[in-house]
Image: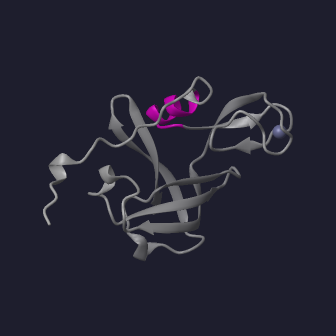
Amino acid sequence: MTDSYDQLPEKPRPQPSTENQPYWDGLREHRLLVQRCANCNKLRHYPRPMCDACYAMDYTWQEIDGRGTVHSWATSHHPFHHSFKREVPYVTVTADLESGVRLQAPLVGSDETALALGLRVIVDYADVDASLSLPCLRLES
Ligand SMILES: [Zn+2]
């Protein structure tokens, strides 16, 4: 069976809304912005309209530190979308950030053999192109 990587479809891109645009703008500037509930002050990530603690709709944006620890990880051996066929196997880490939010992102700079629960990680930024940067996680050295 032949399968040319040259014919892979484009990777799907995030479709920012006016509500979550500040998050994507922050990533472009290599800053991690999360929402803070204006009613109960709880930080939340991913961006969403309503606080899951008090159901308030008002929030502000706050930059947080990207340091945390490994909560869990998964290795994908099959691409969930054909355009990711070149990347498999790839590792997605779920990190508990020191700010209290949980973030899931691809692991860069190491493979899964280096991972352990509780290891220190830090958010890094992958510049896809001039208009899109994505968060990723690397082991803190
Ligand atoms: Zn709240």
Left or right? Give the position of 127 relative to 56: left
How far across and down, in percent of the image, does residue 55 sit? 83, 38
Q: Is residue 93 left or right of residue 130?
A: right
Quadrant for the N terminus, please. bottom left
- Quadrant of the image occupied by residue 109: bottom left
Outermost front residue: 1
Is 123 placed above or below 69 here?
Answer: above
Q: Is residue 103 magenta?
A: no
At 37% from the left edge and 52% from the top edge, which residue is drawn? Answer: 81
Q: Position of residue 43 (x, y in %)?
A: 73, 42
Q: Residue at x 58, y 59 (%)?
A: 95
Within the image, what quadrant is residue 114 found in? Answer: bottom left
Magenta residues, dominant SS class = helix
Ligand number 1: quarter of image: top right
Number of marks present in the image shown: 0
x then y, percent, for residue 28: 44, 32
By what rule are the colours in the image chosen? one colour
For the question of whether residue 140 can be seen, the reply is no
Residue 61 position, x and y percent, is 67, 31
Query: Magenta region: which residues?
Result: 22-31
Please state, as top left, top right, bottom left or bottom right, where the C terminus lies in the image.
bottom left
Q: Is residue 77 visible to us here?
A: yes
Q: Residue at x 56, y 60 (%)?
A: 94
